[in-house]
Image (cartoon, rainbow, N blue to C red):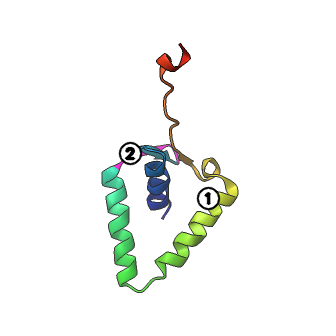
Amino acid sequence: MRVVRGAELAAASGHGAWKLDGKMIDAPVVLKAQLLLEKAKQCRLNVDAIMEDVTRNLMRQGSETKGISIPLPEEDPEDDE
């Protein structure tokens, strides 16, 4: 769940790869997590409610405390001139 939510946060800030608990997360890892969530839904698990809890916890505690690290955009050196 944190992988999928972290991917949403990363995509919103324009990043395709990011870190979760110190490990790089990229598109193949996200796809695998998304497929796993789909299987959980097929098993009638309330994935949406759990995702809401994950999102609330990330927002309340800050993503860094949950091990999610999304790189900041690099500054353009030409902007300083």
**Tag 2: amino acid:** Gly
Residue at image mark 1: 58
Q: Quadrant of residue 44?
A: bottom left
Residue furthest to the top in view is 81
8, above or below 54, in the image: above
Residue furthest to the bottom in view is 44
Identified at 49% across, 82% down, the residue is 46
Total numbered badges shown on the rendered structure: 2
Residue at image mark 2: 16
Identified at 64% across, 50% down, the residue is 65
- Mark 1 neighbour density, 10 Å: few (under 14) some (14–19) many (20 or more): some
Q: Is residue 25 magenta?
A: yes
Q: Position of residue 17 (x, y in %)?
A: 40, 44
User: Which badge, 1 or 2, comes first in the chain's sequence?
Assistant: 2
The region drawn magenta spans 21-26
* Residue 69, numbered circle: none
15, above or below 32, in the image: above
**Tag 1: amino acid:** Leu
Q: Position of residue 75 (x, y in %)?
A: 51, 26
